[in-house]
Amino acid sequence: MICVFDIRTARPHFPGIGRYATGLVPALAAQLTDGERLVLLCNDAAQEANFSHLLKINSAVETFRIQATPFSFSQQWQVAHSLQQLSKDQSALCFHSPYYLMPYWLGVPTVLTVHDLIPILLPETVSSRARLFFRLTHRLALRSADRIIAVSAATGRDLTRAFNIDKTRITVIPHGVERRFHPQPQPEIERVQTAYDLPACFILYLGINKPHKNLAGLIQAYAMLPACTPPLVIAGPWDTRYPEAKQHVARLQLTERIRFLGPVNNVDLPGLYSAATVFVFPSRYEGFGFPVLEAMACGTPVVCSNVSSLPEVAGEAASYFDPSQPSAIATQLLGLLQSDSLCQMYAARGIQRALQFTWEQTASATIALYRSMPPHGRFPDHANKKHGAN
């Protein structure tokens, strides 16, 4: 078996997919058996560099570079041609795309990972043009895939409702958490605090500022808290198309209490999580929710939304609120901040909960799916309309 894993979206523009690829690929490589190969499809040296160590230590892993990006129409024939170059026996191939902009007519067994359906479930957060494009390209991708990986049961349910996908084509395989996310020693915490000029106590949010992340609701909630509340630190990349969060901070006169940290160096993330007093995640929708899992793994008490996949990920290891109610966010935050015992309880629960999510488990389920693929193209029932994306 030759599995071709498309890493062309393992880049900063796709932070979630990038983490998925960099977490899953090494774990997949470790589980290859004799006669199995893992080929990483890429289109630049930077993507190859992300896996350079793996390529050196595992001869069953290789890269294959093409010019076409996932946004290029030419990928429709360039990828197919690449597969022919990799093996004359197309029945030996399996193609895995972690993104819905993919080649749609390959003629080899294909796996698609679906991370979320934000433009469909939260249509007000994107333009009508973006919604139409998202729905069209998803339909093409879902029709092309023999098997579909949903990163959470919530995402799987959303798929069946939005696209009438037969449940038998969907396999729920949650993400893992990197082993580097664990409670950090005090010297590392102090190093990160110094590097980013952070106070001893603070509330942390980590993520982008897109509308579904609900930063406006978090800021409104924070404005309801007493003036003695530890500062709120909002970290992560900033999309200039959505200035509302900073506008809210200025309007509510919170510039002295809320700090926008910007992007954080990847190596500093465990220390940043560990330094926080509480981690808050007010998102209105998540396909999975990496930051919640990473914060729990670092022993930081988590308070987050009670919607989509987040209760599935955090279980009983987080305090929950309705993200549509700023007062509810404020109440849960205050409850944790005023109770050391609650913080200690959720911190301990979070560490134990995070142990249930490993990339080794994700890889084991994923490679089992590869091995179950038919040797010659489509599953027998794949062309049946009720199994398609309608």
Image: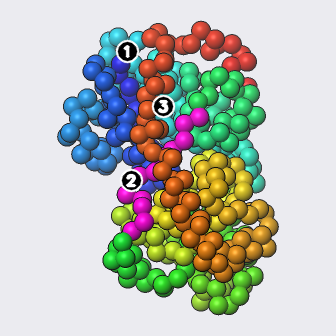
- Is 154 situated above or below 277? above
Q: Residue at x 54, y 53 (%)?
A: 353
Q: Given the image, on which type of amino acid does mark 3 rest?
A: Ala
From the viewer's perspective, is 351 left or right of 231?
left
Which quarter of the figure is the N terminus placed in? Answer: top left
Q: Which mark is residue 287?
A: none
- Is 373 situated above or below 380? below
Q: Which mark is residue 179?
A: 2
Q: Given the image, on which type of amino acid does mark 1 rest?
A: Ala
Question: How is the structure coloured here?
Answer: rainbow
Of 246 and 166, the residue lying toward us: 166
- Is 222 situated above or below 35? below
Of 76 and 273, the residue lying toward us: 273
Q: Which quadrant of the view contains residue 161?
A: top right
Mark 2 or mark 1: which is in front? 2
The secondary structure that most of the magenta stretch takes on is loop
- Is 176 inside the magenta-drawn segment? yes
Which quarter of the figure is the C terminus placed in? Answer: top right
Q: What residue would you read off at disc 1?
A: 92
Q: Secondary structure at mark 1?
A: helix
Q: Nearer the N terminus, badge 3 or badge 1?
A: 1
Write down the region rendered in magenta: 172-184
Q: Residues within 10 Å of mark 3 (few under 14, many from 20)?
A: some
Q: What residue would you read off at disc 3?
A: 365
Q: Residue at x 59, y 84 (%)?
A: 230
